[in-house]
Amino acid sequence: QVQLVESGGGLVQAGGSLRLSCAASQRIVTTYYMAWFRQAPGQEREFVATITRAIGSTYYAASVKGRFTISRDNTNGTVYLQMNSLKPEDTAVYYCAATSRYYSDYGRRSRYEFWGQGPQVTVSS
């Protein structure tokens, strides 16, 4: 069983920054494909960013590219999502996810086997 424990959500003004953390284990973050999704009220859960195992290539949704950065610390088994220049439309519950297999359509939520509990991020205007 893979356990993903998230932290770092909260309330921030537009233009501000937050960093989310997803604690797993060293084995998980180096052997699984890790990702962040988000879900706003009344909307579908959407892909935000992913980081591949081994090389650690990163991919982003167009809506966050250039503002958000996904990274990982192999030593402490944690994946991060640094969010800068936040906008009110970034308000959502953010979920950490993991899958053991590679999929070219990494943005599909059904590809991920394990999920975190989802901290709330609220951006005020």
Image: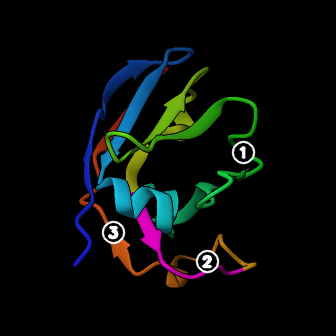
Cα distance in 3D space between marks 2 and 3? 13 Å
> Which one is nearer the viewer's eye here, 119 or 114?
114
> Which one is nearer the viewer's eye here, 15 or 105?
105
Q: How many marks?
A: 3
Helix, strand or loop status at disc 3: strand
Cα distance in 3D space between marks 3 and 1? 22 Å
Q: Does residue 57 appear left or right of residue 51 in this picture?
A: right
| Kind of residue at badge 1 | Ser
Q: Eyeballing the image, is 99 above or below 91?
A: below
Mark before the other along the chain sequence, 2 or 3: 2
* Crowdedness near tag 1: few (<14), some (14–19) or many (≥20) residues, C-alpha within 10 Å: few
Percent coordinates x, y for residue 72 in the rendering:
49, 42
Q: Eyeballing the image, is 119 above or below 121?
A: below
Q: Nearer the viewer, mark 3 or mark 1?
A: 3
* Crowdedness near tag 3: few (<14), some (14–19) or many (≥20) residues, C-alpha within 10 Å: many
Instruction: For the N terminus, give its image quadrant.
Output: bottom left
Percent coordinates x, y for residue 41 in the rendering:
40, 58
| Kind of residue at badge 2 | Arg
Helix, strand or loop status at disc 2: loop
Q: Which residue is mark 3?
A: 115
Q: Does residue 60 appear left or right of residue 89 in this picture?
A: right
Q: Does residue 27 appear left or right of residue 45 in this picture?
A: left
Percent coordinates x, y for residue 118 in the rendering:
29, 55
How was this image coloured?
A: rainbow
Helix, strand or loop status at disc 1: loop
Mark before the other along the chain sequence, 3 or 1: 1
Q: Which residue is mark 1?
A: 63
